[in-house]
Image (tube, helix red, strand yellow):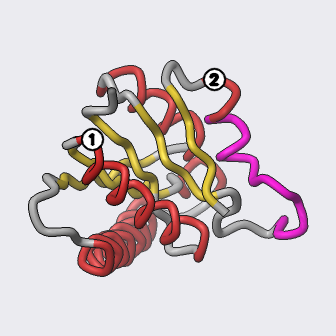
Amino acid sequence: MFKKILAPVDGSIGSKAAAKKAMQIATDYGAEVTFVYVAVDIYSSSRLSNEDYNQLQSAYMAQGEAMLEDVINEVKIEGVLTNKKMLTGHPAQVLLNECKEGGYDLVVIGSRGQSLMQDFPMGSVSSRVVQYAPCTVLIVR
């Protein structure tokens, strides 16, 4: 049933739990898991020079890459094919585009990520993905 699973990660406890669940599901179905980190593009909301923007965005991407590697190594299960992607933009929109373009059967996402609004029962990114994804979405708490 599930052959391609998308697992967005952002370093939050919820996204780590979702990554672990994605790997368990992949084991059960013989699926592959693509872990994705979406770096918010800071340029649209900043007044940085091009040089400062490039340095800051590079640092942000490097931090995301390291976090992505850590999560993958933490949840790794022998025999499950994994991929990783680093993307940039508004997280919800980027994830929805990736769902459509990548032909995923399932998205496994944490209920809340790294945001300032920790008191809401479901984060804005996971909420938008649930509403608009073209495939099944599993929310993990």
User: Residue 18, image x and y in percent?
Assistant: 50, 61
User: Residue 8, image x and y in percent?
Assistant: 45, 53
**Residue 29: which disc?**
1
Q: Is label 1 in a helix, a strand or a loop?
A: helix
User: Residue 13, image x and y in percent?
Assistant: 59, 76
- Residue extending farthest to the front is 28
Task: Name the amino acid type tagged 2.
Answer: Tyr
User: Residue 67, image x and y in percent?
Assistant: 37, 77
Q: Is label 2 in a helix, a strand or a loop?
A: helix
Q: Name the residue under label 2.
A: 132
In the picture, measured across the screen, residue 79 lies left or right of residue 127, that is left
On whether residue 11 falls in the magenta region, the answer is no
- Judge whether 101 appears above or below 42 on screen: above
Local crowd at mark 2 within 10 Å, few (<14), some, or many (≥20)? few
Is the residue under label 1 in contact with that under label 2 (CB below 8 Å)? Answer: no
In which quarter of the view is residue 3 placed?
top left
From which residue to which does the magenta span run? 117-129
Q: Which of 52 and 18 is in front in this view?
A: 18
In the picture, measured across the screen, residue 87 lies left or right of residue 43, that is left
In which quarter of the view is residue 63 placed?
bottom left
- Judge whether 16 appears above or below 89 on screen: below
In which quarter of the view is residue 62 placed?
bottom left
- Residue extending farthest to the left is 79
**Residue 13: which disc?**
none
